[in-house]
């Protein structure tokens, strides 16, 4: 059985398909996720990507059999293995298409990195979250850039160091997830978000993701201001920028909606 199922459409869906191991990932899953998001990110048909999972858990982190193999790895083998995980997270995080995590169950350890690498996250109200690494004598190094950005440094200090489990409401409070709903409302909330993404200018969404990566956490100085000035001037002059403004003034749909 494939580690993933992939549905390609205007809203593409990548589904973790290993419910028997709580969708824990191994080297096969890492390779397939990397390839899937790289390909969908370059697919002109695709406007947004949903990361979902089958079964009771969203992702339980690393697969136990994979962890057993890693226990005997040399330092060099561990470096290569960690680099592949880091590349998967980078590809998801920098994907030019907006990404939405559809969280139907628990998220542990490395699974937290998958959620954090997505632009948005919608959680069922029964899901629990945990950065459990320190209990195993490890720490969440590879996922840390994404998780800290997602929940903030202050919350990360608590949950990285204590490995406490927290619920979806707490995930919402600290900003790790954007919406918490009952199971029967999960798909409707994801659909609401993806509809909003599909209604936006494809080029503007792509450029906006780059802007977010460039600006977040940076000092507001002359260099950053000049970068934003250049950015708005360029997008105003772009084909979709001109079309969007003209369609608004003319009270008509822009072409990216008229064609959909």
Image (cartoon, rainbow, N blue to C red):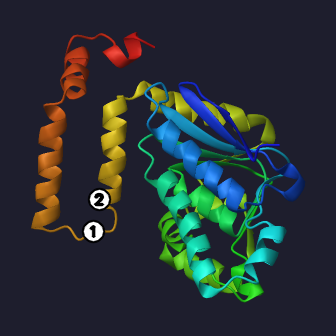
Residue 214, disc: 2
Which mark's residue is nearer the viewer, 2 or 1? 2
- 243 vs 8: above or below: above
- 230 vs 248: above or below: below
Q: Quadrant of residue 72?
A: bottom right
Q: What x and y, as percent, mark residue 5?
A: 72, 38
Residue 218, disc: 1
Q: Give the residue at x 15% y 55%.
A: 227
Q: What x and y, as percent, mark residue 132?
A: 73, 77
Q: Quadrant of residue 28?
A: bottom right
- 210 vs 199: above or below: below
Residue 144, disc: none
- 186 vs 88: above or below: above
Q: Quadrant of residue 259?
A: top left
Labels 2 & 1 near each other (Cβ < 8 A): yes
Q: Secondary structure at mark 2?
A: helix
Direction from residue 162 to residue 234 in the image, left or right: left
In this rendering, does residue 208 appear at all?
yes
Q: What x and y, as percent, mark residue 26?
A: 72, 62
In this rendering, does residue 170 appear at all?
no
**In which quadrant is the N terminus drawn?**
top right
Q: Give the residue at x 22% y 20%.
A: 243
* Residue at the far right in the pictured view: 20
Q: Nearer the viewer, residue 181 or 119?
A: 119
Q: Give the residue at x 37% y 30%.
A: 202
Q: What x and y, as percent, mark residue 169?
A: 69, 59
């Amino acid at each position: 059985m494939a580690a993933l199922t992939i549905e390609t459409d205007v809203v593409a869906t990548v589904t973790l398909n290993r419910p028997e191991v709580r969708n824990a990932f191994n080297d096969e899953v890492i390779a397939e996720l990397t390839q899937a998001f790289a390909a969908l990110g370059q697919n002109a048909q695709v406007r947004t990507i949903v990361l979902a999972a089958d079964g009771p858990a969203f992702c339980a982190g690393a697969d136990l059999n994979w962890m057993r193999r890693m226990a005997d790895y040399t330092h060099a083998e561990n470096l290569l293995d960690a680099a592949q995980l880091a590349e998967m997270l980078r590809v998801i995080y920098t994907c030019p298409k907006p990404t939405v995590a559809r969280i139907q169950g628990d998220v542990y350890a490395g699974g937290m990195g998958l959620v954090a690498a997505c632009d948005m996250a919608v959680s069922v109200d029964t899901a629990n979250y945990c950065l459990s690494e320190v209990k195993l004598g490890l720490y969440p190094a590879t996922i840390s850039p994404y998780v800290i950005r997602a929940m903030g440094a202050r919350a990360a200090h608590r949950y990285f160091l204590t490995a406490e489990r927290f619920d979806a409401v707490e995930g919402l409070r600290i900003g790790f997830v954007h919406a918490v709903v009952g199971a029967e409302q999960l798909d409707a909330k994801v659909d609401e978000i993806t509809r909003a993404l599909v209604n936006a200018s494809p080029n503007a969404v792509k450029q906006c993701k780059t802007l977010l990566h460039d600006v977040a956490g940076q000092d507001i100085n002359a260099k950053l201001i000049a970068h934003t000035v250049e950015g708005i001037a360029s997008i105003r002059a772009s084909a979709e920028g001109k079309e969007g403004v003209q369609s608004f003034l003319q009270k008509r749909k822009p072409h990216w909606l008229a064609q959909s």
